[in-house]
Amino acid sequence: MVLYAGGSQATIEETGSTNRPGLRVTFDHGGHATVEQRNGQIDQVKLPSGLCSQFMRDLKEVGRLATIPAHHCMKSVSFGSRLFIEFEGDKSPDLSCPGQPEPHTDALQKDAQQILAAAREAARIQQRNIITVRPPYSPKS
């Protein structure tokens, strides 16, 4: 992986699901980022530096990622995804469940979602929506 030199780097990974491709974004304070798609495509993009700096500040407020309590929620087996953050050799538990109980963790999760959205836009990653169409009902005779 190639990334611009810009100090400490954080990584956000959304594992994806059957209807949403996974994404891994590694970035620094300045917004220099590497976006890796599940299909192997890698893009170098520029993210909003203010958003990246805010994420880094919230990351410091949280402290060690491995000590964040796991927060569980109901997820579809085929449509659920997971969200992880890595920083300086430390990795968070799954942060994909809404409403994290600790305010700093909740802020970090929201920042991560905004960075993923900005990375998708910067890398021009199109969202795929899978729509299931059921055949018309036909009663059995």
Image: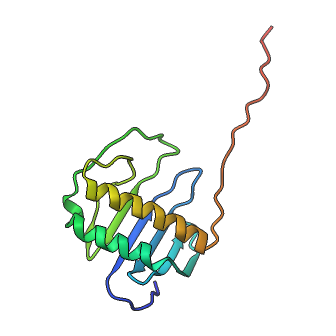
- Position of residue 92 in the picture relative to residue 112 (left or right): left
27 shown above or below 75? below
Location of residue 127 in the rendering, given as x and y in whole percent from the top left corner: 64, 58
Q: What x and y, as percent, mark residue 21? A: 56, 59
Which residue extends farthest front? 50
In the shown orientation, is residue 121 left or right of residue 81? right
Residue 83 found in image quarter: bottom left
Query: Which residue occupies 39% across, 47% down?
Result: 98
The one nearer the camera, 116 or 22, is 116
Left or right of residue 42: residue 64? left
Q: Residue at x 66, y 63 (%)?
A: 126
- Work out whether residue 77 or residue 118 is closer to the camera in this orientation and state it: 118
Along the viewing direction, whichever of 54 and 44 lies nearer the viewer: 54
Name the residue at 52% across, 52% down: 17
Picture colour scheme: rainbow
Residue 106 pos. (x, y %): 32, 54
* Residue drawn at point x = 40 percent, y = 92 percent: 5
Q: Quadrant of the C terminus?
A: top right
Q: Where is residue 107 in the image (x, y as percent from the top left)?
A: 34, 59
Instruction: Please indicate, yes or no, whether residue 81 appears anywhere in the rendered image.
Output: yes
Residue 93 visible in the current orientation: no
From the viewer's side, name the closer residue of 129 and 46: 46
Relative to 132, does residue 54 appear above or below in the rendering?
Answer: below
* Residue placed furthest toward the top: 141
Residue 64, quarter of the rendered image: bottom left
Report which quarter residue 40 is drawn in. bottom right
| Tally of numbered tags | 0
